[in-house]
Image: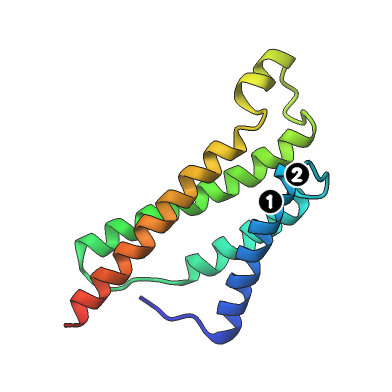
Amino acid sequence: MRQLSKSEVAVMLLGGLLMVVGAGANILFMTWAPYVFAPGALLFVAMQLRQRYDGHDFTIRRLRRMLIISDVLFLVAGLLMLANQSNFFGLNQLLYIKYVHNNWVVVLLVAAILQLYAGHRIANEIEKEAK
């Protein structure tokens, strides 16, 4: 895996911190929370996409694709969090409640689980590959 520079690591950590603050504040019904979570997700995803794997190990490539899916889900969670503030999709009330209202939590949970699993397995596989 391509290693990030110190400034890129700092941007990634800032993005992760903003995501945690935004998600926690949204649970506490703060109206500014989505506007903190969404930029944090953008920063985190941008830096994670800069990490590339140029090797040929099938397992690491598959796990890398899982990380990319997780990144997309982080962005979808940010979009749903913004949509949860107001119905800017223009849906009627029943469709809004069924498909948008607080569903960002489910998407964020799936993204976090994929992120944890793939990150842990990639570290183990790279360690195994180095030996």
Q: Residue at x 77, y 52 (%)?
A: 35
Task: Report the residue at 67% width, 50% height from top.
Answer: 23
How far separated are the C-alphas under marks 1 and 2? 7 Å
Relative to 69, is 122 above or below?
A: below
Quadrant of residue 29 within the rendered picture: top right
Residue type for callout 1:
Gly
The quadrant the N terminus occupies is bottom left
In the rendered view, would you say 117 is above or below 78?
Answer: below
Question: Residue pushed farthest left?
Answer: 131
Give the residue pinned by disc 2. Answer: 28
Query: Considering depth in this image, is 1 or 126 the residue closer to the camera?
Result: 126
The secondary element bearing badge 2 is classed as: loop
Give the residue at the far bottom of this rendering: 6
Label number found at residue 102: none
User: Do residues under tags 1 and 2 come within 8 Å of each other at their CB atoms?
Assistant: yes
Residue 13 image point, x, y percent: 60, 71
x and y percentages locating residue 117 in the rendered image:
36, 56
Q: Is residue 119 left or right of residue 30?
A: left
Q: Amino acid at mark 2?
A: Leu
Q: Quadrant of the C terminus?
A: bottom left
Q: Write down the residue under mark 1.
A: 24
Categorize mark 1 by other alpha carbons within 10 Å: few (<14), some (14-19), many (20+).
some
